[in-house]
Amino acid sequence: MANILVTGGAGFIGSHTCVELIKAGHKIVVLDNFVNSDVESLTRVKTICVTDFPVEKGDVLDTGFVRSLLKKHKIESVIHFAGLKAVGESVEQPLAYYNNNVVGTYSLLSAMNDAGVHKIVFSSSATVYGDPQVLPLTESHPLSATNPYGRSKLIVEDMLRDLYKSDNQWQISILRYFNPCGAHQSGLIGEDPKGIPNNLVPFVAQVASGRREKLNIWGNDYDTPDGTGVRDYIHVVDLAEGHVKALESLSVGSGCVAVNLGTGKGYSVKEVATAFGNAAGTAIPYIIANRRPGDIASCYADCSFAKEYLNWSAKRNLVDMMTDHWRWQQNNPDGYSDCTN
Ligand code: NAD
Ligand code: UFG
């Protein structure tokens, strides 16, 4: 099988995708600068898969280095996870986000072009739909951005579409993730947020483990069944399997295609807290706080195109997501920095 470069492969979604790629028989090379991850995640991927693969420490912004890797490892396709992802931080440091996410992708694409590598799977986000006008969200919903992080994803999507128009030997898959959570069933790899988690599930996990006192529910006056925000949570292993399908679809023909990866089901903040409490065997204490600026009421996917185009649909439910996330949290209360596990 051809070699695949996985940028950002040490991160949350990248590490799980490495496992599924290896399971499917692919050969991988990881490029990561470890700005938001730990090399331990890759050691554990190797343990899970009982195999070895090259890990290259470096930055996608370094075009020359990426070009040399593509040649050295005879890379045929790239899965591009590397990027910064915190919405609030992107408002405070927009230049860091445009540099890392937009210039970083430009640098990667330039290196790929130079090296004659034209297959890429790109990590986009449901954030490119802005405030949903119609639910569930189909891929043809109008695109907009409400913060620099979202705008960086939209700019890269546009860049990829322009690139394909200019040269249709490119084979591009744009994956729009909904809300990834959960962890590998082994409990060896999972999400390892630095500092206070922004996202709901890792925050709730830390409340369940006693590391944080209570959950702040950001508003209960939304137009949703219980007033709290509704999202489409997707198990990270389902997401990882979607990447394998997307990668394999690239060999079928050229194009630039955007695909939603979600479950199609929305759950409220309260439903998630209850489900996590059930998985952990403890109630999740919470208070109702003010709405978080920029949040939307509801967001969930229409996943019919993923089924049709990739022959992929999510298999794992909310109980699986919470159970697996809790196992990871319990086994690794301090994430990868606690390497005694
Ligand atoms: P993550 O932070 O866990 O992983 C990103 C990885 O990229 C990290 O290992 C980091 O060290 C690396 N990285 C960052 N900048 C780099 C650079 N310039 N050069 C080399 N490596 C670099 O994030 P994740 O949750 O795994 O997300 C992966 C991708 O999916 C990101 O592009 C993110 O924007 C996108 N995404 C994530 C979510 C989510 O909720 N997790 C939702 C939608 C889209
Ligand atoms: N929430 C709380 N308390 C918390 C954290 C979150 O009530 O401590 C609520 C939010 O208000 C929202 C829901 O839980 O209603 C989910 O919030 P997350 O922060 O987990 O996820 P978002 O949907 O806000 O954002 C995520 C990613 C973004 C991405 C977006 C769309 O973090 O990067 O999905 O894909 F852009």
Image: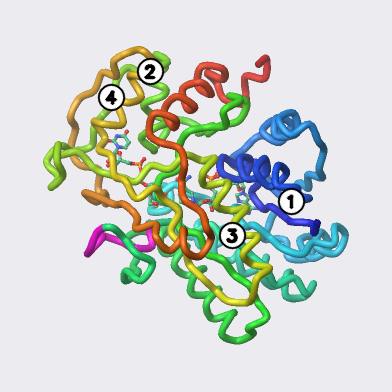
Please tell me whether mark 4 or mark 1 is closer to you in this view.
4
Upstream in sequence: badge 3 or badge 4: 3
Q: Label 2 vs label 4: CA separation?
A: 11 Å
| 10 Å crowding of disc 4: few (<14), some (14-19), many (20+) | some
Q: Looking at the picture, does residue 113 appear above or below residue 182?
A: below
Question: Left or right: 270 with respect to 66?
Answer: left
Q: Of helix, strand and loop, which one carries label 1?
A: loop
Q: Is mark 4 within 8 Å of ligand 2?
A: no
Upstream in sequence: badge 1 or badge 2: 1
| Quadrant position of residue 321 | top left
Q: Is mark 1 within 8 Å of ligand 1?
A: yes
Quadrant occupied by the N terminus: bottom right
In the rendered structure, does residue 129 fall within the stretch colored magenta? yes
Q: Are marks 2 and 4 in contact (CB under 8 Å)?
A: no
Q: Residue at x 53, y 24 (%)?
A: 328
Where does label 3 land, which residue? 246
Q: Label 4 vs label 1: CA separation?
A: 41 Å
Q: Looking at the picture, does residue 166 appear above or below residue 332?
A: below
The amino acid type of the residue labelled 2 equals Ala
Q: Residue at x 19, y 38 (%)?
A: 228
Q: Of helix, strand and loop, which one carries label 4?
A: helix
The amino acid type of the residue labelled 4 equals Thr
Q: Of helix, strand and loop, which one carries label 2?
A: helix
Where does label 1 land, which residue? 58
Q: Are marks 3 and 2 in contact (CB under 8 Å)?
A: no
Q: Ligand 2 shows up in which quadrant of the image? A: top left
Where does label 4 land, which residue? 274
Which residues are drawn in magenta? 127-135
Upstream in sequence: badge 1 or badge 3: 1
Please tell me whether mark 3 or mark 2 is closer to you in this view.
3
